[in-house]
Image (cartoon, rainbow, N blue to C red):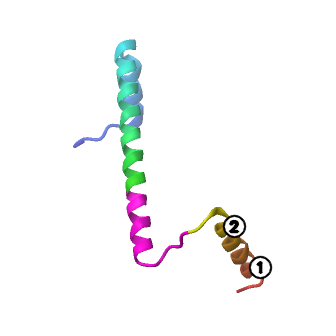
Amino acid sequence: MSNPVSFQTVIEYVDALSPEDLDLLFELIRKKRIEQRRQEIASNAAETLAALAAGQAKRGTIADLRADLLVDNENSCLGW
């Protein structure tokens, strides 16, 4: 978008829409947010796989995670 508009202007435009156009706008925004979230998830997955490949991440069960968190918490309480 070459000329950004203020949020207030957008609200005024939305208020002027017909109910049908408003429904279409809501659907377009919903789909855009879904696609953005998919891209965020894919990016996070790629970062996680890269960290695993580089040996910078651990794999394990929930029990393993809890044990690691408890050890980290105990160490931080001891000033380590």
Q: Residue furthest left?
A: 2
Query: Could you tell me which secondary element the residue under label 2 belongs to?
Result: helix
Vertical placement of 23 versus 75: above or below? above
* Near-viewer residue (11 or 38): 38
Residue 80 percent across, percent down from the top left: 70, 86
User: Mark 1 = which residue?
Assistant: 77
Vertical placement of 48 versus 23: above or below? below
Q: Residue at horizontal 39%, vertical 23%?
A: 14
* Near-viewer residue (6 or 72): 72
Query: Could you tell me which secondary element the residue under label 1 belongs to?
Result: helix
Q: Residue at horizontal 39%, vertical 19%?
A: 23
Q: Quadrant of the N terminus?
A: top left
Within 10 Å of the Cα at label 1, are there few (<14), some (14-19), or many (20+) other Cα atoms? few
Highlighted magenta segment, given as a residue range: 43-59
Residue 68 located within the stretch drawn in magenta: no
* Near-viewer residue (55 or 32): 55
Q: Is residue 15 visible?
A: yes
Residue 31 percent across, percent down from the top left: 37, 34
Q: Amino acid at mark 2?
A: Arg
Vertical placement of 58 versus 8: above or below? below
Q: Nearer the viewer, mark 2 or mark 1?
A: 2
Q: Amino acid at mark 1?
A: Cys
User: Mark 2 = which residue?
Assistant: 66
Residue 55 located within the stretch drawn in magenta: yes
* Near-viewer residue (52 or 47): 52
Q: Is residue 25 left or right of residue 65?
A: left
Tell me which corner region of the image, top left, top right, bottom left or bottom right, holds residue 27. top left
Q: Main secondary structure of the magenta part?
A: helix
Within 10 Å of the Cα at label 2, are there few (<14), some (14-19), or many (20+) other Cα atoms? few
Real-space Cα separation, disc 2 to disc 1, in angstroms = 16 Å
Q: Is residue 22 left or right of residue 66?
A: left
Q: Residue at horizontal 43%, vertical 72%?
A: 51
